[in-house]
Image (spheres, rainbow, N blue to C red):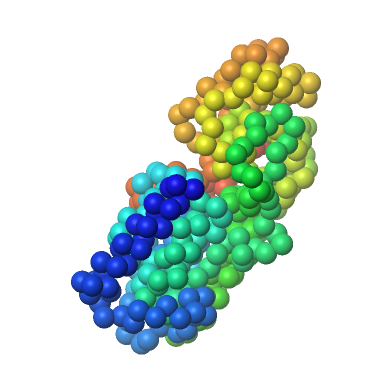
Amino acid sequence: MIMKKYISAFIATVFAVTSVTGCASGMPQNPGNASSGAAADSGDEISIVTTIFPEYDWVMNILGDNPAGAKVSMLLDNGVDLHSFQPTAEDIMKISGCDLFIYVGGESDEWMEDVLEEAVNKDMIVINLLETLGDSAKEEEIVEGMEGHDHEEPEFDEHVWLSLRCASTLTDNIAKALETIDSANAELYRKNADAYIAELSELDNKYEESVSKAATKTLLFGDRFPFRYMTDDYDLDYYAAFVGCSAETEASFETISFLANKVDELNLHAIMTIEGDNHKIAQTIADTATASDIEILTMDSMQSVTSKDVDAGATYLKIMEDNLAVLDKALM
């Protein structure tokens, strides 16, 4: 709560300074209806701001050759994940004046509300991923053996991008927004979006086929668990040390013991982790379990993808394909 108040005060300061210095380039200060949307004026550069890598990659696939020369920004481009990100003054002003802003919309993004209230572009189209998914958005859940967390009320699980089915819905909505902003290229954006959605659907079918043939239908994570949307898509069961948004790094003896017993009970040969260097909990579970041939396998939740990774060729589809290969191995 203290951090949220700090960020809100910081945002207010940024807008106060820019309104005095004219850094808003003479744009109107009345935010109007930030989510109404309108076509960009002819000749204006289209500015698109995304918070995380999957959103950025979806946009780039829809733009294709980018005939309008749209400028696309990814705010979390240096490996800081969604749950610990703090905006800079430059980030705030990018959002405030853009034509299309895409963000997840969970608890980690609550600071966005202050930015959008003060946005200088009254015609900005805003896509909140959780709101777009509606009833398909899921609350975090505490499964048996999982460490509790400090939320007084249930929070939505923010990791919607780890469902290929959600990705298809969100890509379609982003395409519609771009068609509104740049009607001259609407047909191309729709064609690109439909082709990309077909690729997402094809990979979704591969996941479904793989899981249908799997000997095991349970994943066990000695880590945070951001893959609930994925496991629900394919009717997989799971156990984990923490919920996906947890900041915990140490698991209790009871949690370790429970998960190790589950490894033995279900005859699992793999313990899962997410990207990062700290796999201590997973290793401790493996060491505690009876079996001696347990592998530690890592799935990429795409929370640490950087602009350097993008430049090196990282794509949403490629990472999801790699995750399928890991899933195949875990469910053998």
In front: 162, or 5?
5
Q: Residue at x 45, y 71 (%)?
A: 117
In the image: residue 308, left or right of residue 147? left
Residue found at x 32% / y 67%:
15
Residue 310: give x, y in percent of width and height. 39, 51
Q: Position of residue 265 (x, y in %)?
A: 79, 21
Q: Is residue 131 or residue 46 the one in the foreground?
A: 131
**Among the 4 quarters of the image, the one containing residue 299:** top right
- How many numbered discs sit on the rendered protein? 0
Decide if residue 75 is in sight here: no
Residue depicted at x 53% and y 72%: 175
Percent across and percent down for residue 14 are: 30, 63
**For the view shown, which residue lies furthest in the bottom direction?**
42
Residue found at the very far left of the displayed protein: 21
> Residue 122 is drawn in which quadrant?
bottom left
Up the image or down, 264 lies above or below 55; here it is above
Q: Residue at x 64, y 45 (%)?
A: 152
Which residue is at the front of the view, 303 or 328?
303
Residue 293: image x %, image y %? 65, 16
| Residue 133 can be seen, yes or no | yes
Query: Taking 21 as reference, is 273 above or below it?
Result: above
Image quadrant holding the C terminus, namely top right
229 or 248: nearer the viewer: 248
